[in-house]
Image (tube, rainbow, N blue to C red):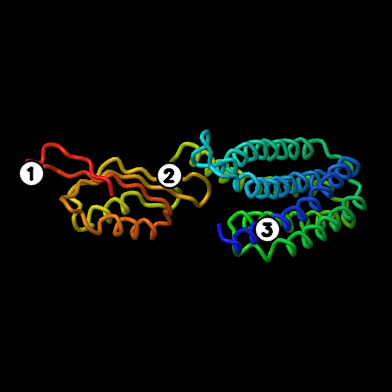
Amino acid sequence: MTDAHSHGRQANARQLTAALALTGSFLVVEVIYGFISGSLALLSDAGHMLTDVMALALSLFAIRIGARPADRQRTFGYRRTEVLAAAVNAGALFAIGIYILVEAYRRLQEPVDVQTIPMLIVAVLGLIVNLISARILVSGSGDSLNMKSAYLEVMGDLLGSVAVIVGALLIRFTGLTWLDPVLGALIGLWVLPRTWALLKASVNVLLEGVPEGLDLDALRTELARVPGITELHDLHVWSVTTGEHNLTVHLVVPPPAAGVQDAVETIAERYGIEHVTLQLEEANRHGDHAAHLHP
């Protein structure tokens, strides 16, 4: 790891720590006032802010733990901890989203009085917190997928804060208390698809599935066209963690197989695959067995 890369990771960690402390502190305030005001929209926004806190914590956790070197027990290192945490978080957040929808339905059947002043004050403070957090994270969002994910989470929560502010004002001036559960449900519906996508992507990595967006058939076709390759089998492509893809394949080639490895690595790079492991096999002159070669 270069000094520049190391310094970049340290800077990202400091930014995430600051944003996490700010957002996490306000989350507690928002939950308390959500119960005090009786606002489901405020509680729903707190649930969304919880997604921000978890995303920030996950990104920071990935930087800290993922930097640990591989050892005899973890030959790939600790980078997959990010995916494990993401799967657990996504499951919990999906449950929260379902709870918000059920509670919204119940409150539409049995309306609850909402104190709009605490709801409005806390929503405005939440908007300010999100703006500050976004400002902290924006400088690193172009360099790291972790940072970009955290930044987008915070920016998304801005919409939730704005929705709560609008809801508080409408309820204050119209007295239409049913707007609160409707806004809560809308925020919940906005969170659920993103949570499901996160859970789906996490499970795919844990099952060592083909990375999303990678066309395995197209990759196989390109590899088969490399001059010198007469046959390929046992092609596997998977992710150790988000954005870090690996490829292994057995290739049957005639000797001396010059340039095959470089050609395969070039193709893999176009598919976003960073680590390539080849097993070259030399077909005998009768073509009924293969002898292993090591590049």
Structural distance between the alpha carbons of marks 3 and 1: 57 Å
Q: Are marks 3 and 1 in contact (CB under 8 Å)?
A: no
Other-residue count near label 2 (Cα within 10 Å), few / some / many at <14 / 14–19 / ≥20: many
Which residue matches tag 2?
A: 238
For the point 59% across and 59% down, the residue is: 144
In percent of the image, x 65 and y 63: which residue is there?
140
Percent of width and height locating residue 295: 28, 50
Q: Is residue 148 above or below residue 26?
A: below
Q: Which residue is mark 1?
A: 285
Q: Say the numbered circle drawn on residue 12.
A: 3
Q: Nearer the viewer, residue 66 or 180?
A: 66
What secondary structure is marked by label 2? Answer: strand
Camera-nearest label, 3 or 2 = 3
Report the Cα–Cα distance between label 3 and label 2.
27 Å
The residues bearing labels 2 and 1 have C-alpha atoms spaced at a distance of: 34 Å
Instruction: Report x, y in % for residue 17.
Output: 75, 52
What type is the residue that disc 3 sits on? Asn
